[in-house]
Image (cartoon, rainbow, N blue to C red):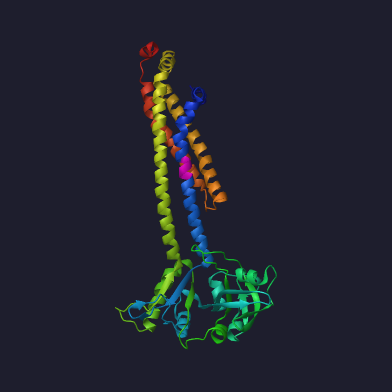
Amino acid sequence: MSLLGTLRVAIRALLRNKMRSFLTTLGVIIGVGAVIAMVAIGEGAKAQIQATFDNMGTNMLVVRSGSNSTGGARGGAGSQPTLTWDDVQAIRDEVATVRLVAPSQRTTTQILSDTSNWSTSVEGTTPEYFVIRNWRASSGSVLSDLDVDGGAKVAVLGTTVAEKLFGRADPVGRAVRIGNVPFIVIGVAQKKGQSGFGQDFDDVVFVPASTFAAKIQGGLGQYLRGSLFLGAASASDTRFAQADVTQLLRARHHLGAGDPDDFTVNNLEEVASARQEGTQTMTRLLAGIALVSLLVGGIGIMNIMLVSVTERTREIGLRMAIGAKPRHVRAQFVVEAMLLSLVGGLLGVALGAGTAAYLKAELDWPTQVQPLIVVVALGFSGLVGVAFGLYPAHKASRLDPIQALRFE
């Protein structure tokens, strides 16, 4: 019998018991659906983590001062100024793996427009900061070298601040007061959204670093009040840049071999990778649990196929009596088992994709269905059908035609 003929016979046999066939495939449906849904949730979480860190900046390192210690109580990173403006220049001049360096000095204060006010973070920085963080202006322009060199009283607003102070109006060219000092708005930064920890990146105002020190918060002489944002020359140079900066700062701060660093250099790529690895591990665990459902579904298929062999003993005997060979009978039952598992796999794909879409639309969970996982899940379900259909098929092919015809 041809493959097409075998397939037709298998379909007719399965349609004779529609409800039983559906219940047989239920384990496969749930298994495939769970695999696809779990992996979609995991991939969505990974993509969200990567997008969050991409929003923070590319190839970026953050250098913070050390911590102070008073009466045995230690402050957090940055509580003791240890970075100097000379350190900034030295990193620019001596570390080949670092392309850009930008200081970041922050304070929280009230900012006022003609009609409204808002308490927000004010950050003193330089034009390199916007390049490192890949942050452009949606309106107007960002800070320039002339603004920093001249100590200009200009400001770039985050979108949250712009909306709170000016609503939907374009604030470029308008005046605001930061504390008691008047500034002219020269731009609105593009919307960045929130970090994975709920921080609003857009609730900020940027001013030139020189103006920040002179007009908003007094400086500390040679010491930098705040942190440094560094842009590595490339993604592959990020770790080398981290090591190079650490070595340079230890030498400049005269730290001995056994002395701890009086600064921290954070590589955001490492943080992102660590969080993604944690998410990936959980995804694999959940997918592994879901695969158990597939195996249970396979056992269900084998059980029903064994029942089918018993029910159709006379049919098998009749076919073998009129010339069907054992391989034809074996192929018949393998094809039936594979059809059950593949139909269950297709329904499982629909269930998994639908579940992922529901979670994304109704619960705002990040999900991402991967085509490769769909193909793998379908392939695995087909393999389950073949694997668990072989024994019933082999049993059917070993029946004695004479004994089978006598079976009641």
Residue 149 in view: yes
Residue at x 44% of width, y 80% of height? 94
- Picture quadrant of residue 330: top left
The prevailing secondary structure element of the residues shown in magenta is helix
Q: Could you tell me residue 202's position as x and y percent?
A: 58, 69
How far across and how far down the image is residue 27, in percent? 44, 35
Relative to 403, is 75 above or below? below
Between 362 and 101, the one lying in front of the other is: 362
Magenta residue check for 8: no
Q: Nearer the viewer, residue 103 or 5?
A: 103
Report the magenta residues as a range. Answer: 32-36
Q: Front-most of 172 and 405? A: 172
Q: Nearer the viewer, residue 189 or 5?
A: 189
Lateral position of residue 339 relative to residue 164, left or right: left
Q: Residue at x 69, y 67 (%)?
A: 168
Residue 145 appears left or right of 262: right
Q: Position of residue 210 (x, y in %)?
A: 55, 84
The residue at the point 48 percent across, 55 percent down is: 45
